[in-house]
Amino acid sequence: MCSGLRSAVPLAVVVEEILLNLPAHQVVRVCRLVCHEWKELVDSAAHWRERCRREGIQPQDVSRPPDNWCQFYFLTKKRRNLLKNPRAEGWTIVQNGGHRWVAEENRKPFPDETVTKCFVTSYGLCMKQQLIDLKKEGYSDAFMDQLQPHIKISDWYAPRFDCGCQYEISVELLDRRKNPICTFQPQKVFFQQWNDEPWCQMIHVFKDYGPGVRFIHFTHGGVDTQFWAGWYGIRVTNSSVEICPAKEDLSLQLLSTAMHFF
């Protein structure tokens, strides 16, 4: 069967259709090992371009199609949060004022019921950070430079009802020497005493930031504004940083920065 693929175009078309209807991981791990002809089909840009088309996956900028359609397909399908332990563990503490950072159970139900913990700040400024190495996360230099995929930032924060507090965030896209290429640093958010303890979401999408991005530096935190002993400052949880290679309808509706109250 395989030996006739080069001369039997209809048969090649049939095989290609079969491959396109199999799970992508099976095609890569099993089918491409069957014979040379199948390997050529699986390794072709046409196969992955057609698979993307059928699944409605297209680049954010159609004028910049990916050089490697297979890589583009899998990185799109495996899109994930690049922050480690976003819900209450595993961060580098930058500032640890007052009675220091602590992790607590949420005082008020979170929109996602699986999120039950948050970080809590004190009466001295508390800031924490993570540095994301994009190459270690599977995003090659060529992929980032050529496609410049959208980078979506999301962070959730909430005050206590009985104490005023402040929230701040800064996210930097860094080059290989860790110099900033692009920065998102909105104005600090203040809550007055006696509020409804709303969970709020900060969203930003980096676009058209140019070549050279190799790291993402995420920093956030805050403080209570009444200098109360204990942990009455801003609460943060469920932070995320996602690389978004493919166009999605939702992203087109987002403002550069948005806040949603629950």
Image (cartoon, rainbow, N blue to C red):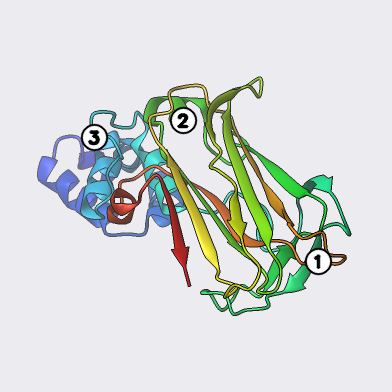
Is disc 3 placed on a helix, strand or loop? loop
Mark 1, residues whose alpha carbon is within 10 Å: few (<14), some, or many (≥20)? many
User: What numbered label is drawn on residue 144?
Assistant: 2
* Earlier residue among tags 2 and 3: 3
User: What numbered label is drawn on residue 62?
Assistant: 3
Q: Which residue is mark 1?
A: 231
* Residue 241 seen in the figure: yes
Q: How many marks?
A: 3
The quadrant where residue 233 appears? bottom right
Is disc 2 placed on a helix, strand or loop? helix
Eyeballing the image, is 236 above or below 4? Answer: below
Q: Residue 166 at what x, y percent from top left?
A: 66, 54
**Residue at horizontal 43 percent and vertical 23 percent from the top:** 210
Q: CA distance from mark 3 to mark 1?
A: 49 Å
At label 3, the amino acid type is Val
* Earlier residue among tags 2 and 1: 2
At label 1, the amino acid type is Trp
> Seen in the image, is 96 located left or right of residue 109?
right
